Image (spheres, coloured by chain):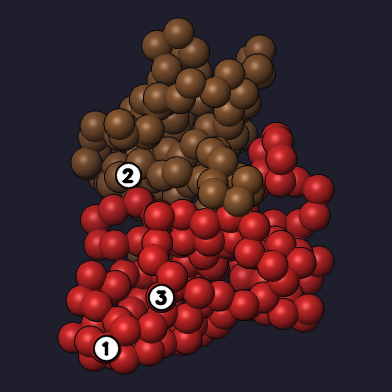
Chain colours: A brown, B red
Amino acid sequence: AQKITQTQPGMFVQEKEAVTLDCTYDTSDPSYGLFWYKQPSSGEMIFLIYQGSYDQQNATEGRYSLNFQKARKSANLVISASQLGDSAMYFCAMREKSLGGANNLFFGTGTRLTVIP
Amino acid sequence: ETGVTQSPTHLIKTRGQQVTLRCSSQSGHNTVSWYQQALGQGPQFIFQYYREEENGRGNFPPRFSGLQFPNYSSELNVNALELDDSALYLCASRPPGTGSSGANVLTFGAGSRLTVL
């Protein structure tokens, strides 16, 4: 079963508007972590925001906030006041245990966001 | 500016050949992970090294191997290249004490794009 689902292959948003990128997840582990990364055309993955499963409040980092709905297993990213530089691929990821016991990230397929001037 | 540098940025190989990709992590980051990102997909975890030993592995065959050196550099080696090995290979590192829980934030490099013909 797919662990991270991003159903929006592409999204468009007008500059200065807010946009929500969807992410649902599946895990039986009561302790987990959810991440959002941004990948511009240059290739590197840039960390945006983190939400732990036991965190009481939704995470916020500047213009980024995470709409965490635990019962629905969703962790949507909200970007407020979009800027042209926000145009990129956005990946939702979940921390999981690998063979050998080390933690690693399981990524979704991503959403390409385009900000329109 | 990213603290993780990768080389080469692009390379082309033919089926059956071997390739070595290199990564220089941020000073003090004693954990390094490698991810494979096929076109249009999210990154997939290959393996992780901690203090020069592999301590986690994803669903990749043994022809994918690695090394980590005391100077915070590392290598990914792929033998007997196949067409499906064409991808962006991302190296990521994190400082000590951030692995088992919490944000576990990885710092990624810009990747090495491998094309297998």
Are discs 2 and 1 located on one and the same chain?
no
Give the x, y percent position of residue B114. 33, 79
**The quarter of the displayed image where residue A116 is located:** top left
Give the x, y percent position of residue B12. 29, 89
Mark with earlier residue (1, 3):
1
Say if residue B1 shows up in the picture.
no
**Which residue is at 77% across, 80% downward?**
B71
- Residue A52 to residue A13: above or below: above
Kindly indicate whether the residue at mark 3 contacts the one at mark 1 (C-beta within 8 angstroms): no
Give the x, y percent position of residue B48. 59, 60
**Residue A45, numbered circle:** none
Residue with the mark numbered 2: A110
Say few, some or many: other residues with alpha carbon within 10 Å of mark 2 (under 14 / 14 to 19 / 20 or more). many
Q: Secondary structure at mark 1?
A: loop
Residue with the mark numbered 1: B16
Say few, some or many: other residues with alpha carbon within 10 Å of mark 1 (under 14 / 14 to 19 / 20 or more). some
**Which residue is at 56% across, 75% downward?**
B66
- Residue A64 to residue A108: above or below: above
Residue with the mark numbered 3: B63
Task: Please name the amino acid that badge 1 sits on.
Answer: Gly
For the residues labelled 1 and 3, the Cα–Cα distance comes to 11 Å
Judge depth for marks 3 and 2 and give the one in front. 3
Say if residue B80 shows up in the picture.
yes
**The one of A40 and A25 positioned closer to us in this rendering:** A25
Q: Secondary structure at mark 3?
A: loop
Are discs 1 and 3 located on one and the same chain?
yes
**Which residue is at 60% across, 51% downward?**
A100
Looking at the rendered image, the quarter that the N terminus of chain A falls into is top left
Name the chain letter of the residue that bears numbered label 2: A
**The quarter of the displayed image where residue A90 is located:** top left
Task: Please name the amino acid that badge 2 sits on.
Answer: Gly
